[in-house]
């Protein structure tokens, strides 16, 4: 099993994902993705690797009928949370590399911070292209270079020193497509040569360092790699090392940039 394939979470972790990661990170990007894809009222929209559905929900807010939006994820724990929050969206369990839809089924395909975890990202992008109508729009977000996410660089170093390489690998896994040339190469290998890639600045923000560390641990495979002593040591060192990112009230805010990849017809200039 590869590192990316092991990034499956329990139902409890899916709840943590929705309660903590969505407001701290993912909810900030969903409006940017649907805007970049120019989702409009008549569109049929597919969100690939939808997680608990924050991006699909943003798309559903822009179409005439939320049933026009489909969210697909391999993880049933994520989908259970998604169905509870927005039952009118069509939630499907499935493999991104073998989408269970016919050719040309959607006007818009979007994917937010999931491509990095697919075992075969080229096959996943090829499938996105297959189910997209010829004049459809594609918008995909992945995290930018790891070195730009300076708070995560700090936490990764602590995790490796205290818990070993496997723990550090969990924290670096989301940045595996952070090299622009490699990212473009994935789309070209999938048969999409004409893409626009933009590095957009962003941040991650949590009420405290403790909340950040707890969320990163309990919302990911990192939890299985830490015993009580390891977690306490990680937290204690992180409190000190991440102090430069903290405001007076204790809130920790750190850089977290993303690449936004778009393909399809460009808007007509006016």
Image: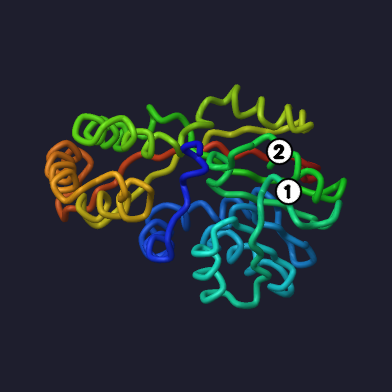
Residue 261 placed where, x, y %?
Answer: 64, 38
Query: 148 above or below 216?
Result: above
Q: Secondary structure at mark 2?
A: helix
Residue at the far top: name it. Answer: 181
Residue 181 placed where, x, y %?
Answer: 60, 22
Q: Is disc 1 in contact with disc 2, using a CB cutoff of under 8 Å?
A: yes
Q: Earlier in the sequence, mark 1 or mark 2?
A: 1
Label 1 to label 2: alpha-carbon separation: 8 Å
Residue 192 placed where, x, y %?
Answer: 77, 33
Find residue 116 and report its image quarter: top right
Q: Along the horizontal axis of the image, is 65 left or right of 3? A: right
Find residue 72 and report its image quarter: bottom right
Residue at the far front: name it. Answer: 1
Residue located beneath label 2 in the image: 123
Q: Residues within 10 Å of mark 2 (few under 14, many from 20)?
A: some
Question: Residue at left 60%, top 29%?
Answer: 183
Question: Residue at left 70%, top 53%?
Answer: 38
Residue located beneath label 1 in the image: 98
């Amino acid at each position: 099993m590869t590192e990316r394939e092991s990034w499956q979470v329990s139902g409890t972790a899916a709840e943590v994902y929705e309660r903590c990661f969505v407001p701290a990170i993912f909810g900030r990007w969903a409006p940017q993705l649907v805007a970049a894809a120019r989702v409009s009222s008549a569109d049929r929209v597919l969100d690939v690797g939808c997680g608990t559905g924050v991006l699909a929900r943003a798309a559903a807010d822009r179409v005439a009928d939320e049933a026009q939006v489909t969210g697909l994820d391999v993880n049933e724990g994520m989908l259970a949370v998604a169905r509870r929050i927005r039952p009118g969206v069509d939630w499907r369990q499935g493999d991104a590399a073998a989408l269970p839809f016919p050719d040309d089924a959607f006007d818009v395909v979007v994917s937010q911070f999931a491509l990095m975890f697919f075992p075969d990202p080229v096959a996943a992008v090829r499938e996105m292209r297959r189910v997209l109508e010829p004049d459809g729009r594609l918008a995909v977000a992945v995290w930018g270079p790891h070195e730009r996410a300076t708070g995560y660089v700090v936490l990764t170093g602590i995790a490796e020193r205290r818990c070993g390489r496997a723990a550090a690998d969990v924290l670096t896994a989301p940045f595996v497509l952070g090299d622009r040339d490699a990212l473009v190469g994935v789309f070209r290998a999938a048969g999409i040569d004409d893409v626009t890639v933009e590095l957009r600045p962003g941040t991650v923000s949590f009420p405290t360092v403790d909340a950040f560390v707890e969320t990163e641990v309990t919302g990911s495979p990192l939890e299985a790699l830490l015993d009580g002593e390891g977690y306490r040591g990680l937290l204690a060192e992180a409190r000190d090392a991440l102090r430069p990112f903290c405001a007076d009230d204790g809130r920790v805010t750190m850089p977290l940039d993303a690449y936004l990849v778009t393909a399809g017809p460009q808007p007509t200039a006016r």
